[in-house]
Amino acid sequence: MGNTYKTNKYRQPLFEIVGMTSTELTFDIAFAYMESEQTENFCWVLEKLKELLVKKHSCPQVILTDRDLALMKAIEIVFPRSINLLCRFHINKNVGAKCKQYMVNDMQKTIYTLWMEVVWASDEVEYGQRLHQLEQACVDYSGFINYVKDTWLTPHKQRFVGAWINRVLHLGNTTTNQVESAHWKLKQMLENNIGDMVKCWEAMNNNLRLQLGNIRASFQKCFYEVEHAHISPFYGNLRGSVSRAALRRIAEELLRVGYVGTNRQICGCTLRLSYVLPCACELGRYAPGGIPIPIDVIHFHWRKLTMEVELEVGADDGLEVDMELEIIEKERSTLYDKLFCNRLAKVRESLMIKSFGSQPQQKWLTLPDMGSLIANHYNVVLVCLGKPCMTFFPMTSSHSPNVSIYCIGFVNQNHWVQVNMKEGFPLPPVTLDWKKFRCPTTTSWMLGFAGRLQHWQLLTPILA
Ligand SMILES: [Zn+2]
């Protein structure tokens, strides 16, 4: 979150909230013109933002800002469970400027390097040692060291120093540079027409279109383009299901396995803790045995390859699942009663045949009824290409990677034929019945096929 100034003729600061995709691109979430930058104004904006969240009781894990005390206070009030990190880039810029103010040329660089080492300290012991070094070097610059301590380290070290933030799930958000660069394009547009609200709105809208286009292209690349470094079967479970940005981070981490081995102490596990990606000590357990990295060790953030509303995965709505579990446990025997309701007898009847050979029309395959039966009975995935296109998952078993997938297509308004699809083809949406009546353990189907389901969504034009 950040503010920009002089972007319209009313001279009101523009407050911008951006998010980051799994492909590490930024997108605008919200804009607000602020009458003044007081806590209560920020609170109003954040409350409005809260109303927009799809999951009502969730909150952002991490919010990254500059050291704007009014905004920070507002975040504490509106999103008390979010972690408010401070942008390192801005802090370093400010500290760099103070260096110039307090000391002569050749000292500036030395002190600034020592400062950076403090910021990057990977644990509290290291932090203590490096801070001590900085203090020693600054004996003649008490103004500077007091500034650094009073403004930054004492009140805020947990919000930007590695020793603390390496343990926070921030998924790579450590500078608001993203906000800046998203701003930069927008600013260009806004500044060209220091205009009224309508002009500004148009500029924002254009910016959004631009972002959306880039983001969709970046998602598509995750499905169609494999980087050379990720060809190995080691990444087999992840290709097409995880963003290339995440794969790049993993490939980079893999280089550490040589000296980390499986030792957690040496590893430090930053990638696991801050990015929820497998860190070197974990990779060290898979790599030697040639075990492909399992998909479920990757945070859902990196698996979201669509801008559509999040796929239902059940992983983080525990309460709902528990309640569902209770209901289904009670009524397991009545799965088909529920599924077919008062048509149960009719469905059963349609399956009874007197003899093999050609059958009257009332015995022909009907969807969705038979789709659910086929998927359940044979424990396969059935994909139907027709109007509508849909995927049937088994409702009582959990996901298995080797499951058979059958695809059928509707032709001549009256006939189903088997369709041979390429390996890994995109899957159409899962039936609503599956979502309503499945056993709780079966949500793993959604996870196992998340990439392919998202791929389909991506190919379906957004209704604008
Ligand atoms: Zn580790």
Image: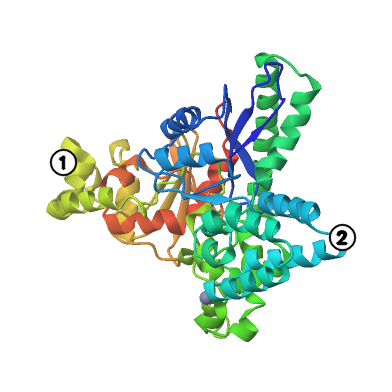
Horizontal and vertical percent position of residue 364 = 33, 41
Residue 113 to residue 432: above or below: below
Q: Secondary structure at mark 1?
A: helix
Q: Residue at x 69, y 14 (%)?
A: 196
Q: In the image, what residue occupies the spot 68% across and 69% down?
A: 134
Q: Position of residue 239 (x, y in %)?
A: 60, 62
Question: Could you tell whether 254 is left or right of 381 in the image?
Answer: right
Q: Identify the residue position indicated by label 2 in the image.
A: 105
The answer to which quarter of the image holds residue 12 is: top right
**Point 62% across, 50% down: residue:** 87
SS at mark 2 in the image: helix
Residue 229, image x and y in percent?
Answer: 71, 69
Q: Of 145 and 197, which appears nearest the observer?
A: 145
408 with respect to 13 (left or right): left
- Measure how far apart labels 2 and 1 are at the Cα level: 89 Å
Would residue 276 be visible to someone looking at this image? no
Q: How many marks?
A: 2
Residue type at mark 1 is: Ala
Q: Quick check: can you spot residue 348?
A: yes
Residue 309 vertical position relative to residue 8 in the rendered view, above or below = below
Mark 1 and mark 2 in contact (Cβ < 8 Å)?
A: no
Q: Residue furthest toward the left?
A: 330
The part of the image, by quadrant, that contains residue 95 is bottom right
Where residue 246 is drawn, which disc sits there? none
Viewer-closest of 382 and 411: 382
At label 2, the amino acid type is Asn
Q: According to the image, label 1 marks what residue?
A: 345
First in sequence, mark 2 or 1: give its number.
2
The picture places residue 66, in percent across and down from the top left corner, at 61, 44
- Label 2 C-beta lies within 8 Å of the nearest ligand 1 atom: no
